[in-house]
Amino acid sequence: MGQPEVYDALRARAWLMVGGQFGLHHLYMDEPLEAFVYFATAGLFLMGVLFDAFAIHSIVRRRNAMLRRAEDEEGLSEPLVACSLGRFLSQFLFGYWIGFVYGLAAMLAFTKNRRTLHSVLVGAAVCKGVYVVGNTRNQRRNLLFIWAAAFSTSFICIQILEMHILRSLLFVSLSATLLGNRGARAVPVRSRRFTYKTYLVLCAIYCAGLLVLTSGISRRVFDRRIVVVSTKHHSRISSSIGLIVYDHFWGTHPNKTIFSYDAHVEYVALGARNQQTDSDWLKPHSKATEASPYISDSELLSRCEHFLRTINRSPGRSHLTSTDWKYLGVKKAYEVIRSIDQL
């Protein structure tokens, strides 16, 4: 996108309507870092998009006024600028948010004993968030100060003090913001240090972190096995959380009793995995999702009765076939379940 002499409010509003949550209206006004802030926070959790919808004309007018003032300025009278409280809080919160996303991805995707990798990822994420907000609105921060504070604090908190990642984010983001505002400088409004290519690179890195986070949630949460013990139906069910969620919302016979008040849930250790069913929740047409393991005793009895009535057996044969063995097994199970159900 080229640098126009004057930005048009109607075009900015059009970009806001098309992709306000991605910051496209800020990208139109050659503000790639502000656009990335919107992209990483879904338009500041949609509240920023709502505010910009009412104030887009004043935002464009203020941006044009800054450009007109910059035409007559040959240099900066005050290269050093003071950090306001609003910018300080914005740097701290956005650095914490980016660190939270990457830290959560590191927790779910990697084991706890890889603390060095965790500290590097958290330091890089916080450094990215603090640096992005610090360089918005024709101000520049030194990346070296932010990097040194973020990585050193992250290493001390996670590697040496062995603090939890989410707790260490507070100290990492705070130290990076404090030291990063050292020597903040003002730059010309027409400075082209950051372009739309910067926006694309930052978004690509952020999306990579989201993919790692999604993979970690799938592996650590949805593949986690639980055992549900129902005192009402005298049943004990073992399955993965992902399969339970799939069966509850999209199964042909959705389970309604697994979340009842009399169900007792036990979590199985991560090491005790069933390779045949743990990862099958992602396959809509797999055997694990077609066969619902959550069934009441009454329905199981009715199915057993139907099977015993419809099975074709030929009594009197010298050897038993697989059908005969299946018949005997179902008949024995039917008698046991019926005796339990009558208690």
Image: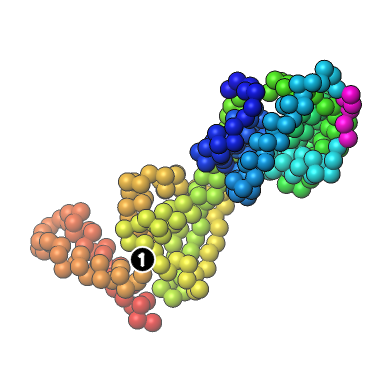
Residue sitting at x 79%, y 37%: 154
The quarter of the image holding the C terminus is bottom left
Q: Which residue is farthest bottom?
A: 343
| Residue 44 falls in image quadrant | top right
Tell me, yes or no, whether the highlighted magenta stretch contains residue 191. no
Label 1 crowding class (10 Å Cα cut-off): few <14, some 14-19, many 20+? some
Q: Position of residue 339 (x, y in %)?
A: 33, 78
Q: Position of residue 314 (x, y in %)?
A: 10, 61
Assess whether residue 80 is covered by the magenta stretch.
yes
The relative height of residue 93 versus residue 123 in the rendered view (above or below) is below
Q: Is the magenta stretch mostly helix, strand or loop?
A: loop
Q: In this view, does 118 lie above or below 44?
A: above
Query: Quick check: 25 left or right of 281?
Result: right
Q: Is residue 114 visible?
A: no
Whether residue 18 appears in this view of the structure is yes
Q: Nearer the viewer, residue 138 or 87?
A: 138
Q: Which residue is rendered at x = 20% and y = 65% of the image?
A: 307
User: Residue 196 at what x, y percent from top left?
Assistant: 61, 24
Q: Mark 1 points at which residue?
A: 295
Residue 108 location, quadrant: top right
Q: Which of 195 and 304 is in front in this view?
A: 195
The quarter of the image holding the N terminus is top right
Residue at the spot 79% in from the left edge and 29% down from the top edge: 139
Please state if 264 lies on the left or on the right of 62 as rendered.
Answer: left
* Badge 1 element: loop
Q: Depth check: 185 or 233 in front?
A: 185
Image vertical order of residue 264 relative to residue 155, above or below: below
Report the amino acid beneath label 1.
Ile
What is the span of residues highlighted in magenta in the rendered image? 77-82
Q: Look at 74% across and 30% down and name the residue there.
A: 66
Where residue 61 appears, as percent x and y from the top left, is: 68, 36
Q: Quadrant of residue 157?
A: top right
